[in-house]
Image (cartoon, helix red, strand yellow):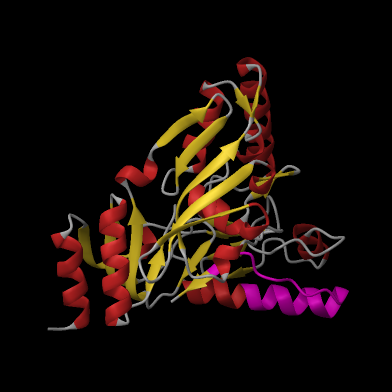
């Protein structure tokens, strides 16, 4: 029996939904990406551990999806299995009056809304970031002078051998758009954030004000992966790109946003190849004109 078929049956036997050759363009905010060999939706920790152990034994790569933001998937798709966390992994609850337990599969928007409803302040900056809570940990997501590391207390995960574990404090190795999970191979299952009591009306006003700013300055009306490049020290990537005359530059269906040059947008029918070519052109031009190397923030998966 083929290895993928064995993994498929294993996942189905523990209650997972499995789709073969699922187009990743349906699951990424860029709306780009070919088929994943297997797209597995997991709803509880027992099933997740079984799937991870089976994939490891079979030598099949596993890629956690999150909310599909900050990703660029190859036109050829993904060889292996994509994991979509649902069910228990999307639950959010109060651990105490100022502490929230959140499943890694929950959207960041859901977490922000939960905090607002409970009059908890500290996550206002994240309102409008189109990612999952687990993805936000993975990248230490941030905006408007705030980042998840400001409020993140601890995380739980499953190792590639199927064992559960947790990290807290310095063990999470949080930094600008980075965390220990980018190198340790573990899959985030939940997180704990510690906030502070606030005024619900003021929290809502701040969230909506930041969302208004985001909509005014960023191309939220078009498919994208979010900010394409990390911020070079002492500079803003979008400003450098604009200064180099690249606003509106286009390769196929991929274009440097005319609203914010730090974003590449899908104008319709863009391919991964289009985006990669445009990224290369931007990096080359900015380096030639400014001497500054731009590092991609968007993760490329194949």
Residue at the spot 41% in from the left edge and 62% down from the top edge: 64
Seen at 27% across and 61% down, the residue is 40
Q: Start and end of the magenta stretch?
A: 279-299
Where's residue 90, x and y in %?
38, 42
Q: Is residue 12 left or right of residue 181?
A: left
Residue 23 visible in rendering = yes
Percent coordinates x, y for residue 269 in the rendering:
43, 64
Q: Dividing the image into 4 quarters, which one contains the C terminus? A: bottom left
Disc tally is 0
Left/right placement of residue 259 relative to residue 274 reads right
Looking at the picture, does residue 117 appear above or below residue 83? Answer: above
Instruction: Using the image as rendered, state which of residue 12 and residue 165 is in the foreground.
Output: 165
Look at 67% across and 34% down and name the residue there: 210
Can see residue 227?
no
Q: Is residue 225 magenta?
A: no
Q: Is residue 133 above or below residue 298?
A: above
Up-down relation of residue 128 to residue 289 (above or below) = above
Q: Locate residue 301 relative to residue 256 in the image: left or right.
A: left
Q: Quadrant of the N terminus?
A: bottom left
Q: Is residue 144 left or right of residue 85?
A: right
> Toward which corner of the image does residue 41 lie, by quadrant?
bottom left
Please name the residue shown 37% across and 71% down the image. Answer: 161
**From what the image shows, is residue 122 above or below residue 294?**
above
x then y, percent, for residue 237: 76, 61
126 or 62: nearer the eye?
62
């Amino acid at each position: 029996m083929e290895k993928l078929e064995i993994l498929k049956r294993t996942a189905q036997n523990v209650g997972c939904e499995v789709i073969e050759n699922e187009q990743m363009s349906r699951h990424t905010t860029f709306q780009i990406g070919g088929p994943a060999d297997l797209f597995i939706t997991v709803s509880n920790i027992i099933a997740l551990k079984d799937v991870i152990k089976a994939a490891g034994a079979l030598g099949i790569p596993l890629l956690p999806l999150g909310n599909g933001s900050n990703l660029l998937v190859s036109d050829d798709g993904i060889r292996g299995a994509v994991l979509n966390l649902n069910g228990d992994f999307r639950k959010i609850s109060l651990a105490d009056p100022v502490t929230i337990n959140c499943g890694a599969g929950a959207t960041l928007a859901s977490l922000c809304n939960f905090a607002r409803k409970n009059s908890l302040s500290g996550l206002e900056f994240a309102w409008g970031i189109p990612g999952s809570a687990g993805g936000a940990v993975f990248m230490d997501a941030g905006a408007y002078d705030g980042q998840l590391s400001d409020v993140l207390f601890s995380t739980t995960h499953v190792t590639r051998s199927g064992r559960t574990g947790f990290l807290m404090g310095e063990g999470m190795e949080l930094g600008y758009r980075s965390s220990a999970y980018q190198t340790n191979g573990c899959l985030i299952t939940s997180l704990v954030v510690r906030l502070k009591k606030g005024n619900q009306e003021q929290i809502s006003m701040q969230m909506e004000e930041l969302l208004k700013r985001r909509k005014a300055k960023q191309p939220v009306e078009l498919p994208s992966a979010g900010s394409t490049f990390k911020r070079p020290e002492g500079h803003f990537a979008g400003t450098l790109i604009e200064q180099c005359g690249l606003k509106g530059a286009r390769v196929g269906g991929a274009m440097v946003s005319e609203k914010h040059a730090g974003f590449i947008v899908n104008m319709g029918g863009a391919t991964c190849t289009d985006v990669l070519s445009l990224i290369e052109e931007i990096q080359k031009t900015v380096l030639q004109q400014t001497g500054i190397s731009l590092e991609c923030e968007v993760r490329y998966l194949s």
